[in-house]
Image (tube, grey):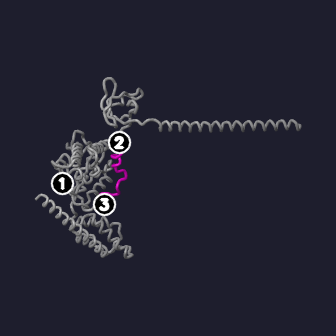
Amino acid sequence: MSSDVRKYYEARIDEDDYIRLLESKIKYLETEKEKLLMKIRYYKSEIEKLLSPPLIEAVVLSILDDGRVVVKSSTGPNLIVNVLGTVPRDKIRPGQHVALNQRGSTIVDVLPEYEDPYVKSMEVIERPNVTFDDIGGLKEQIRELIEVVELPLKNPELFEEIGIEPPKGVLLYGPPGCGKTLLAKAVARESGATFISIVGSELVQKFIGEGARIVREVFKYARKKAPAIVFIDEIDAIAARRLDIGTSGEREVQRTLMQLLAEIDGFKPLDKVKIIAATNRIDILDPAILRPGRFDRLIEVPLPDLKGRYEIFKVHTRRMKLAEDVDLYELARITEGATGAEIKAIVTEAGYNAIRNNRRKVNMNDFLEAVHKVMSKKSIREKNIDILGSKKKESLTSYMF
C-alpha cells in the first residue's frame, strides 16, 4: 500500500472518531438539558405552591336537594357551598372533612380521615418492660385485672357461651406507691392490645368544650384501634364529686366528666375497648362514675402485708449480689407500713451504701441503714401532712364561724 493511500485511511479513521465523540457529547448535553428542565419544572411547582392561597378545612353537615352542601368551616359560621366537578360526590357525606377554596368557599377536595395528633400521641408505642412477674404481693389484684381486661379481649367467645356481658372497666384505688400504675404498665405489656395512656389533668382544658372533645376523640380512636385499653391515671382530676356551686372552670371540668360518663355507658357500644382508671382519692369521686355499668370492678391496691413486702423485696433484689447474712423476711418484718415504692427506695439506698464502702456485695447492715433512712423520712412526711391538714381544718372552721 502506498503512503498516500495509508494517509487517506488514517485521516478517515480520525474523522469517524471525531464524529462519534461529537455525537456522544451531544447525547450528554441533551441528558443534562432534560435534567435541568426537570429541576425547573420542580421549582416552578414549588413556587406555585408557595404562592397559592391556603385552603380552609370544614366538616360536612348535610347535603341539600339541589346538590349544594352545608358545611361547618374552621373559621366560624356554617356555609352553604358548591362542589367542584372533579370531586367525587359519593365521598361527600355528613361528618366528612373537606377542603374549601378560600375565595369562593367551593369544596375542592375530600380530606382523608382525620385523627387528632394530640390524641394519637397518647398511644403507647414502646411497651414498658414490666410484666406481672415484676409485681410482688398483688396476686389477687392481678387475677381480677386479667379476668376483667385481658380475658374479654383474648377470649370473647367464653362470655358469649355463658351469656353474660363482660365488664367495661376497672378502677384501681389505694394509697400512693402501692403499684396501681405498675399494674397498668404490666397490662400494657401483656395484653397485646392498643394501649392509650391519659393523665386526668390532660383532659382539663382552657376553652369550653375542648375537654369533652378530647374525651370523644380518645374513645373514637380507641374504637378504631380495637382491641384497645384506655388507661386514665389520676382520674380524680376530672371525676370529683359534682357541686351545685363552683367557678366556670369547675363547671367545664364537670362537662368533661359528663362526656366521659356518656362514652363509658352511652348509646355507642365500647365493643372491644376496656377502661382502666387509677386514683388514690376514691373518697372524692362522683357516685355516677362508681356505679355498676361504668366501672364494674373496684380493685383495692392496699399497703402490702408481711408476705407482700417479702415478695417485693425478692423482686427488687433478684439482680443484686447479696451477702449471706441478708434476711429478706426480717427486712419485710421491720418495714411494716412501707409501700412498694418505699421498699424499692430501700433496696436502692442499700446498694448505694455498698458502693460507698467499696464493696461488690450488699450486706444486712446496708439494708438496715437504708430502712432507717427511708422510714424516718416517711415519718417526717406524714407528720408534715398531719400538721398541714390540721391547719387547713382550723382555717376552714374559723371561716365558717
State the residue at coordinates (46%, 35%): 52
Q: Secondary structure at mark 2?
A: loop
- Tell me which amino acid carries mark 1: Ile
Kind of residue sitting beneath label 2 = Glu
Q: Is residue 256 above or below residue 358?
A: above
Task: Report the mark closest to the observer, 2 or 3.
Answer: 2
Q: Amino acid at mark 3?
A: Asp
Residue 16 badge: none
In the rendered structure, the answer to whether residue 89 lies left or right of residue 397 reads right
Question: Which numbered marker is on residue 134?
Answer: 3
Residue 168 in sight in this render: no
Is-magenta flag for residue 132? Answer: yes
Question: Toward which corner of the image does residue 63 lie, by quadrant?
Answer: top left
Q: Nearer the viewer, residue 7 or 120?
A: 120
Judging by the rendered image, the residue that carries numbered circle 1 is 284
Q: Quadrant of the N terminus?
A: top right
- In primary-sequence order, the first of circles 1 and 2 is 2
Q: Residues within 10 Å of mark 2 (few under 14, many from 20)?
A: few
Asked if marks 2 and 3 touch (Cβ < 8 Å), the reply is no
Depth check, mark 3 against mark 1: the one in front is: 1
- Which segment is the magenta one? 116-133
